[in-house]
Amino acid sequence: MPKEPGSVTADHGVWQAGVARVDVTPPIGVWLCGFGGRKRPAEGIHDPLHITAAVFERGGVTVAVVSCDVLSIDAVDVARVRSAIAQKTEIPPQNILIHATHTHAGPITSSMRGFGPRDAAYESIFFRQIATAVELAHGRLEPIRLTFGTADASVGINRREGEPGSIVLGENPDGPVDNRTAVLAAWPLATEVTQPRFLVVWAAVHPVLFGADNYLYGRDFPHFAITRLETAFPGTPCLYLTGACGDVNPLGMRSADRFDTARRHGERLAGAALEALAAGRELEKGPIGAVQHWMDVPYEAVPPLNEVRALLQAWEAEVPVASPGGEETRRTTDHRLHWAHDALKALEGRDPDAPLPLSIPTELQVVRLGELTFTAMPFEVFTEYQWMVDAAAQGYESLVVGYANGNYGYLPTRAAFDEGGYEVDRAWWFYTLSQMSKEAPATVRAGIERVHHKMQQGTL
């Protein structure tokens, strides 16, 4: 198990912060990630993709929060980028939060299966640009004050709709959803300045409105929110974070014009963000810092070699002679075939009839800015984990940041495991070698309580 370092200041000193943004829009021709069934790479640009980094310092401790307009980043790449950032800035790796906004109109930047080939040339630039953004933000530190507020946006709905004997992706108005929009604002100390230096905007809704038939790069509905806010405050970058939305989609997924629906949602989100900004209270008390907790999340055993071979043979036989996009595209984008080949590699040299037990060492991180905490989780987190974090944070403002420091797929609740559905039964093919265990929610809940206890105790 990796070490669990952390650093937390005492409550003293003036806040300092800096922000930077770099453009990471790929050239046309890189495959998009997030929807199965796409038959070709990206054909154009709806709106630019960015990496936006904010660095905070107080009392000699520095933390960085980075937002990347892509679907997913692997934990191994997060570790490599953190190391590069630490060498350039001396920010400790455990104090760096690297988040993917989870746009389904961004390029492949992880080992997820079934979305076409990765582009090594693009990724070599993309990961270096994460470090560049943090280095630039670190070089722009200036004294600031911080405010935090929330308001209701109501652009999402629980997507786990019940049908007789099953759960489908739809709309469940009675299911859990977090309708808040949260805004952290960094303001210059000069009292005559009425515009923030930068904003951090958070919402817990899947960025999926552009749809599977879209072949344009874009940030989905957050693009319209960010653009509206940056128009209202020229020169004020907006860093976007996606919260616990593994079971929440935008309202209107069945709309005839998904782009128009995305625009309306984005403008509604921007309006809520302005309300939250106006109602924000100053963050004065409490330390700054970050702590980690590592836990072994249990998964079901990988099927034995003979079973995987049989599945691969059956699935390869299903490739139609004249499939849309051609046989080669079908083989490239079928996540089942990729899973089977990955499983065969993992099982090489083992008893062909013996399953492979599996658990994944997983990081929980809490970044604290006074009375506000970000709990970074490398999963597609269901809504109810936000409530678990709220309880563990013991009265402090708390926001879950999903898709952070890696991504191991969906993290359902224990009740959702019993119900089944896409997130439980099928989505794991894209991410891991086997399905998450029903015991995983209890492991993660204990981890949440542990990492917040360490933060409150100032454990180094």
Image (tube, rainbow, N blue to C red):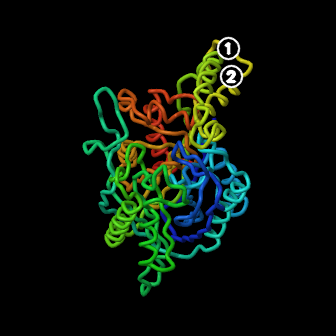
Assess disc 2: are there few (<14), some (14-19) or many (≥20) residues with their C-alpha within 10 Å of its C-alpha: many
Q: What element carries label 2?
A: helix
Q: Which residue lies furthest to the front in this view?
A: 322
Task: Provide residue 218's location: percent of width, then percent of height.
Answer: 52, 61
Assess disc 1: are there few (<14), some (14-19) or many (≥20) residues with their C-alpha within 10 Å of its C-alpha: some
Considering only order in the chain, which callout, 2 or 1, is on the residue closer to the N terminus? 2
Residue at image location 41% in from the left, 66% down from the top: 283
Task: Provide residue 160's location: percent of width, then percent of height.
Answer: 34, 39
**Up/down of 434 relative to 217, above or below:** above
**Up/down of 387 relative to 122, above or below:** above
Q: Quadrant of the N terminus?
A: top right
Residue 44 visible here? yes
**Kind of residue at badge 1:** Pro
Task: Provide residue 260's location: percent of width, then percent of height.
Answer: 38, 63
Badge 1 vs badge 2, beta-carbon distance below 8 Å: yes
The circle on residue 176 is none
Residue at image location 53% in from the left, 32% down from the top: 297
Q: Nearer the viewer, residue 195 or 429?
A: 429
Residue 281 visible here? no
The circle on residue 347 is 2
Residue that numbered label 1 is attached to: 352
Q: Which of 53 and 42 is in front in this view?
A: 42
**Kind of residue at badge 2:** Leu
Q: Which of 45 and 450 is in front in this view?
A: 45
Q: Quadrant of residue 333?
A: top right
Task: Provide residue 451's location: percent of width, then percent of height.
Answer: 49, 44
Answer with left or right where residue 28 lies relative to residue 120: left
